[in-house]
Image: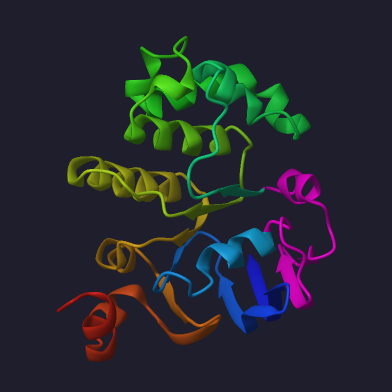
Amino acid sequence: MLNVKDLCFSYGNVPILHNLNFFAQEGEITSMIGSNGAGKSTTLLTISAFNRAQSGTIEFCGERIEQLAPHEIVSRGLIHVPEGRELFPRLTVLENLEMGCAISPKARERKAESSESMFTLFPVLSGRKNQVAGSLSGGEQQMLAIGRALMSCPKLLMLDEPSLGLGPRIVKEVFRMVNQINSDGVTILLVEQNALKSLAISQQAYILENGSISFQGVGKDLLQDDRVRKAYLAL
């Protein structure tokens, strides 16, 4: 579904991504882990066209997208939940959800049905639909950010650090939701600082070091790799 080939990106004169190559299969959870500064978030931002790739290709569902604008990429069903959630803090929960329908005509047609589905998937939000997003807890805000993305009817959902800053109980719930969303037919590309949980649920996984892939394989296999365990799992 997503195929990235020889992708390069620099911030000014500082190269960040170096001939990056990876893919995400339809229907699977693909994870990308690595240390801070490895280029994980930059990779997602470049796929989403918030960063413009200097070279290389990005194919989504067989179409080259590296020259498209962000809203054109969203309209094709590739949706990005950024690190930090990026909600509209003064809008209500329901209004934030409805913003997820803004670009796609298909999503706008299904707005009422989709919002009810989000309250079923995230029941804690149901009683807060008229509460402003800025007053929610961190875990509730993360659920709302994911729910808003799902309102766009994604084919592939890119999640950037969904468990960052959350307590253990909420982290467990976030990963349960990621599995549920994938079971419902959405392909997922997961960038996550919790390497143990991320690798455990991933069919395919990549480890990013200094802007290029250093290891790749089935997530559960990488959990048993001594190099990975020592570097990223403190085992």
- Residue at left offset 49%, top offset 50%: 83
Q: Which quarter of the picture shows residue 198?
A: bottom left
Q: Position of residue 151 (x, y in %)?
A: 59, 32
Whether residue 80 is in magenta: the answer is no
Q: Is residue 76 above or below residue 235?
A: above
What's the magenta region? 48-77
Q: Position of residue 62 (x, y in %)?
A: 75, 67
Relative side of 194 to 151, left or right = left
Q: Position of residue 180 (x, y in %)?
A: 37, 44
Q: Residue furthest front?
A: 13
Whether residue 56 is in magenta: the answer is yes
- 122 or 167: nearer the viewer: 167
- Residue at left offset 60%, top offset 16%: 112
Relative side of 94 to 161, left or right = right
- Is residue 224 visible from the viewing direction of this image? no
- 88 or 125: nearer the viewer: 88
Identify the image quadrant of the C terminus.
bottom left
Q: Tell me which colouring the rendered structure shows.
A: rainbow
- Residue at left offset 44%, top offset 50%: 182
Q: Position of residue 59 (x, y in %)?
A: 73, 69
Relative side of 93 to 14, left or right = left
Identify the image quadrant of the N terminus.
bottom right
- Residue at left offset 68%, top offset 30%: 107
